[in-house]
Image: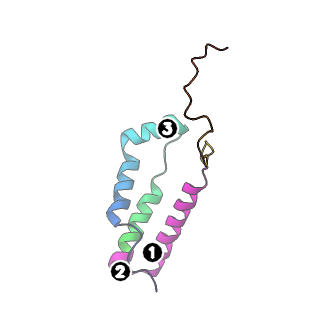
Amino acid sequence: MAKREPPRMCDDYWSEWKHCRNLRNLFHHYYTYGAFPSCKQWKKDYNSCMEWENHKSGEAKTALCESEKRRLLEQNRHFPVWEMRKNPPAEWHLPLSDGKDK
């Protein structure tokens, strides 16, 4: 059975696009990465979402679903810095040393 609704509300794509173009976000992104963010994909996704909702366009549906898949893959490619432990350390209940034993 095919999905009848977009993965997100169209207003969500519009909000993401507005946030991306926000002056504070532009400054933060430039400071962090050395370049301004590209907000074109959010605008394309919004237009595709509106096309899908209003005209039931198959092309818009495909474009929006592919964009969401790429976004999810991009999020999942970053691994955590710390390795998660399964159990606490054996001596977790002992008091911490003050560093005086060095």
Residue 33 vertical position relative to residue 86 in the rendered view, above or below:
above
Tell me the SS state at disc 2: helix
Q: Position of residue 33 (x, y in %)?
A: 54, 39
Q: Earlier in the sequence, mark 2 or mark 1?
A: 2
Residue corresponding to mark 2: 55
Q: Is residue 39 left or right of residue 95?
A: left
Q: Is residue 98 left or right of residue 13?
A: right
Measured in 3D between alpha carbons, the distance from the residue under mark 2 to the one under mark 3, in whole angstroms, is 38 Å
Tell me the SS state at disc 3: helix
Rendered residue at 38%/61% (across/down) = 13
Is 81 or 43 nearer to us in this picture? Answer: 81
* Res. 31 mark: none
Q: Main secondary structure of the magenta part?
A: helix
What is the magenta range? Answer: 52-79
Rendered residue at 49%/43% (across/down) = 36
Rendered residue at 46%/81% (across/down) = 58
Is 11 or 88 nearer to us in this picture? Answer: 88
Q: Residues within 10 Å of mark 3 (few under 14, many from 20)?
A: few
Residue corresponding to mark 1: 60
Residue 85 vertical position relative to residue 94 in the rendered view, above or below:
below
Q: Earlier in the sequence, mark 2 or mark 3?
A: 3
Q: Amino acid at mark 3?
A: Tyr
Measured in 3D between alpha carbons, the distance from the residue under mark 1 to the one under mark 3, in whole angstroms, is 31 Å
Figure disc tally? 3
Q: Residues within 10 Å of mark 1 (few under 14, many from 20)?
A: many
